[in-house]
Amino acid sequence: MKYDFIQEYCLSKKGTEEDYKASWDAIRYTVRGKIYALIGNDREGNHIISVKLPPDFGLELREQYAEITPGYHLNKTHWNSMLLGGKVPDEVLKKMLDSSYELIFQSLSKKVQAEIIGNYEL
């Protein structure tokens, strides 16, 4: 896989957990059970990663890169899938992962956010 930094990068984010869901044949990166990145295969067997993005940002990326498409078997407005064998720069994928993580993190309660970052004064 070209983007061999994904696991380490995701696990470096506070509160991230990795698991494998056999029925989906996919690796999931979650924060408190909420998925922000999903690695699996599309119907042709291509390795893909799917991330949740703000709709405008996702649309912008889809227009710039042929390898980024509406989420495979996911909500097409909020989720985007990217071929892992493509030519999207590493920094773009990292920005996608950052944005997806932030969306999920911000959806958590302030109490849970504080627990995750270790700051109980939020």
Image (spheres, rainbow, N blue to C red):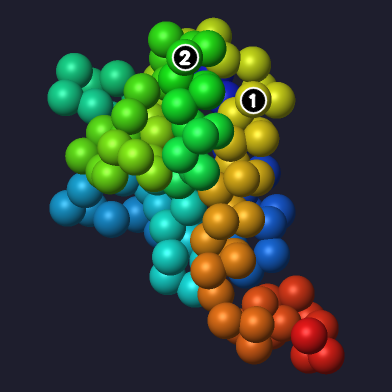
Q: Residues within 10 Å of mark 2 (few under 14, many from 20)?
A: few
Please provide percent x and percent y for residue 19. 41, 59
- Which label number is shown at residue 63? 2
| In the rendered image, the vertical position of residue 100 relative to residue 111, given as above or below | above
Q: Residues within 10 Å of mark 1 (few under 14, many from 20)?
A: few
Res 73 quadrant in image: top left
Considering depth in this image, is 28 or 4 the residue closer to the camera? 28
User: Residue visible at 59% across and 65% down?
Assistant: 105
- Which label number is shown at residue 77? none
**Looking at the image, is mark 2 or mark 1 earlier in the sequence?**
2
Please provide percent x and percent y for residue 107. 53, 69
| In the rendered image, the vertical position of residue 19 relative to residue 40, given as above or below | below
Q: Amino acid at mark 2?
A: Glu
Q: Amino acid at mark 1?
A: Val
| In the rendered image, the vertical position of residue 20 relative to residue 117, given as above or below | above
Mark 1: which secondary structure?
helix
Residue position for label 1:
92
| In the rendered image, the vertical position of residue 41 relative to residue 121, given as above or below | above
Please provide percent x and percent y for residue 57. 55, 33
Please provide percent x and percent y for residue 10. 61, 49
Considering depth in this image, is 16 or 34 the residue closer to the camera? 34
Mark 2: which secondary structure?
helix
Residue 48 falls left or right of residue 10: left
Asked if residue 33 can be seen in this view, the reply is: yes
Considering depth in this image, is 59 or 108 the residue closer to the camera? 59
